[in-house]
Image (cartoon, rainbow, N blue to C red):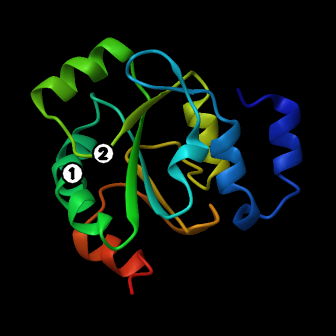
Amino acid sequence: MLSCRLLAGLLLTPLSALAGSLLDGAVLTGLNGKPAVFARYQGKTTVVNFWATWCAPCRKEMPLLSALAPRLAARQVRFVGIALDQPGAVTAYLKQLPVSYPVLMSDGEGIALMRALGNRSGGLPFTVVLDEQGRPLTRVAGLLSEAELMKALPLR
């Protein structure tokens, strides 16, 4: 959970040094309700997408992200979704429209986490591309296009 004290301290630290540690300290759970540690998803370029089932642009971009995730896995890019929603709604939604990447649940601090990562408006969808060390390369608020994402990735 992001406390006021933690957020105050974060304001004094450059964002480029924070993304990985912010996500590592976030309270996240798997769809099974068990705690999930974000560090498990680091070590490669990581596309982190914040979304919700009630967000129309989120639903529009998820098939794109799901198609890109297996294609880019061989190029050392992984995708992680972070849902800012109710677990039951997310589980039901993903039964109808499964995705090829892991989806984690954020507790009530998800909007504060997005803002700390650079999404000042708190709107969805919000995507952050992290390098292998967890530093943000790109942030996109709103609907993400394939061209935009491909341009943001450090592909070899």
Residue 114 visible in the displayed image? no
Asked which quadrant contains residue 154, the reply is: bottom left
Which quadrant, please, contains the C terminus? bottom left
Q: Which residue lies furthest to the bottom in this view?
A: 156
The label shown at residue 101 is 2
Task: Tell me: 36 left or right of 57.
Answer: right
Between 21 and 144, the one lying in front of the other is: 21
Residue 143: image quadrant is bottom left
From this view, report whether residue 45 is shown above or below residue 54: below
Q: Which residue is drawn at 36% across and 81% down?
A: 151
Q: Name which residue lies at 66% across and 42% down.
A: 24
Identify the mark at residue 66; answer none if there is no mark: 1
Q: Disc 1, disc 2: CB below 8 Å?
A: yes
Q: Residue at x 57, y 67 (%)?
A: 132
Q: Single out the residue that lies furthest toward the front.
A: 74
| SS at mark 1 in the image | helix
Mark 1: give few (<14), some (14-19) or many (20+) Cα within 10 Å.
Answer: some
In this rendering, is residue 22 above or below 4?
below
Which of the two labelled residues, at mark 1 and mark 2, occupies the earlier sequence position?
1
Q: Residue 1, how many percent across, how many down?
A: 70, 26
Amino acid residing under circle 2: Tyr
* Left or right of 73 on screen, residue 15: right
Q: From the viewer's perspective, tell me whether residue 114 is left or right of residue 9.
A: left
- Graded by Cα atoms within 10 Å as few (under 14), some (14 to 19) or many (20 or more), the crowding at tag 2 reads some
